[in-house]
Amino acid sequence: MHFSPTERQQRELELPNSRTYLVARSFAAISALRSKLRVLRHNDGRAGGIGAWCRDLQHVLRCLPPALVAAGDYLLPDRSRDGEFCLETVLEPVPNHASRVMLGSERDRLGMRKVRLEWSLSDADRANYLRSIRLVVAELAAQGIVDPVGPSASMEQPWPSSVQWCWHHIGTTRMHRDSNKGVVDVNCRVHGLDNLFVAGSSVFPTPGSDTPTLTIVALAVRLAGHLRDLLSARNVADVTSAPAPTRSWP
């Protein structure tokens, strides 16, 4: 179960998609440590230099004490456990021209140039998060579901070091009817090419805030049906346009 602004609120406040969960504070502390360890493991010092690696290590060290406390909390009897909860929000980032995938100068074992990812969050993402979370908290408090404790989300929160990633690779071949605004059309066909199609989350116009797997499968099934119809129509056209066979009699 999650909480989200209504469609009317999204339209009126121009908010992207989001979903907010009530998460036990102990679980959130352990989850944050796992996320920072994952970042540290993937950053071998080459992506952003030794400075970026040291910053990732600092984030891990900051997450370690609350994670250890949370782990100890699980060993206590149920009645003695910490009953506090925090809010965890999955927010849809807005399209950002500064975020892109490019070919780097480094090459792999096969001599192919490696891919380099430039990914950044904008001030608009931060503002959207603050507006969304404040809206959800106000409504939950008004309904008596939660009793807010401590400071609410503010612009003073570390950003983006406080952000945890969902690790879904989405975008780069955006779907749009206009070739000037997208890479593929509504049938996942690359604009300007008749026989090149793309099926996957790269065609999503925006990332959304839900897990993308079911949408990817739906797009693949839809594309398979479209290709089947195209090939069937082509085969029928080839048969009807072919000349009648000739026979020679002895």
Image (cartoon, rainbow, N blue to C red):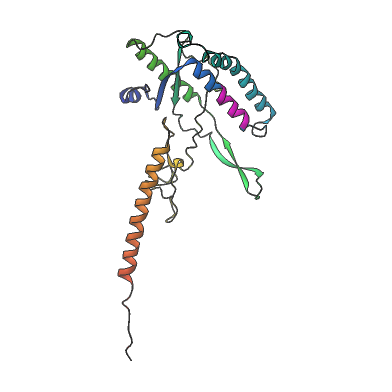
Please state which of residues 23 and 118 is positioned toward the viewer in this rendering.
23
Placement of 166 over or under 88, stated as above or below: below
> How many numbered marks does the figure carry?
0
Dominant secondary structure of the residues highlighted in magenta in the image:
helix
Q: Nearer the viewer, residue 83 or 178?
A: 83
Residue 168, how many percent across, how many down? 49, 35
Q: Nearer the viewer, residue 190 or 231?
A: 231
Instruction: Answer whether residue 79 is magenta in the image.
Output: no
Q: Does 161 appear above or below 223?
A: above
Image quadrant where one finds the C terminus? bottom left
Point out the image quarter for the N terminus: top left
Q: Is residue 107 above or below residue 147?
A: below
- Residue at the image point whose x is 51% and y is 11% from the top: 76
Q: Which residues are magenta?
A: 33-41
Q: Position of residue 214 (x, y in %)?
A: 39, 38
Q: Which residue in the rendered view is the most extreme toward the bottom?
A: 250
Give percent across and percent down for residue 169.
50, 37
What percent of the width, then of the height, locates residue 78?
46, 12
Magenta span has 36?
yes
Q: Residue furthest front?
A: 77
> In screen coordinates, is 20 left or right of 29?
left
Q: Is residue 140 left or right of residue 110?
A: left
Q: Nearer the viewer, residue 157 or 70?
A: 70
